[in-house]
Amino acid sequence: MTAARTAFDHGVAGRPLAVAAALAWRNLVGIRRVPATFVPAVVMPVFFLIAFSGQYRGIVEIPGFATDNVLSWYTPMAVLMGASFAGVGTAFSVARDLETGFFDRLLLSPAARGAIMCGSLLAGAARGLITFALVTAVGLAGGAAVPGGVPGLVSLLIAALGVATVAGLWALGLVYRIKSQSAGPVVQVGIFVGLFLTTAQAPLEVITGWLHPVARLNPVSQILELARQGFLEGVAWSSTWPGLAAIGGLAAVMLVFAVRGMRTLTP
């Protein structure tokens, strides 16, 4: 019997926090049963970290570049990639529940729909925390430096959890509408477009062509600045508040998208 089913059997369906916690725990337990929903959230970021830091290591030779350590530039990007995959992974679990009919039972229960969605987001944040720890550890083991110290790592963690939440809301909005795991390709395209049409690979000053205005206007570039600041220099409010504002704005838009998607569901 699943943790969520047990929780409902004991009458917690009317308590939103208990419902969200039970569903989040059920989602995390599912990692052991279906590792494929989580393993890419660690393997792919580490792959890109190694590939980019090797292929583009000459980027640190650009005059005035913020660091001479290529891993310090690419590790935060890899962490945010892992966090986005973590948020998406929890939505794929919801897609399986929609396909098997378990989600219909949730909708028929006294549990509030907001609590059901929050359970998925809590699971995504927990998955994001795991990927943050593992991918950051790989970067540091490889030689990445954090001159910003603990505040720099905290900035990266905040950015990672924010991205996991935004990505989770994006994926949930699509899954609620498509109602199957076939939403996966569309979800992933959105994640890659949102992440790579930014300053993920190079600073804005050296980006040319059509990508320059796109990267400048893409709010994810501000989140990357929030994540990277501790790996490049000290943490400063001028580099922090734009990233926080970008997370808040994207989360608000994606929340509306996800809520409207959930309203289309009928048991």
Image: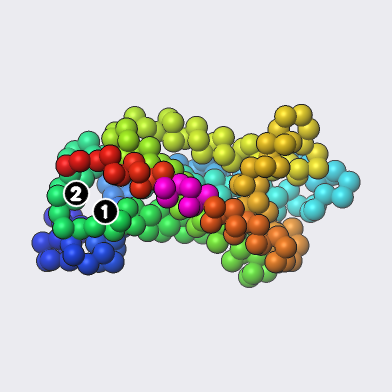
Q: CA distance from mark 2 to mark 1?
A: 7 Å
Q: Which residues are magenta?
A: 250-256
Residue extending furthest toward the left: 9
Identify the residue at horizontal 51%, vertical 39% (top origin): 191
Residue 12: name its quadrant. Answer: bottom left
- The amino acid marked with disc number 1 is Arg
User: Of callouts 2 and 1, which one flags the residue occurring earlier in the amino acid sequence?
Assistant: 2
Q: As drawn, which residue projects farthest toward the right?
A: 63
What's the mark number on residue 139?
Answer: none
* Helix, strand or loop at mark 1: helix
Q: Quadrant of residue 127?
A: bottom left
Residue 167 in the image, given as x and y percentages of width and height = 47, 46
* Along the line of sight, the residue nearer the viewer: 68 or 189: 189
Disc 1: which residue: 113
26 vs 130, left or right, is left
**Residue 265 covered by magenta stretch:** no
The residue under label 2 is: 107
Residue 29 % position (x, y) = 28, 54
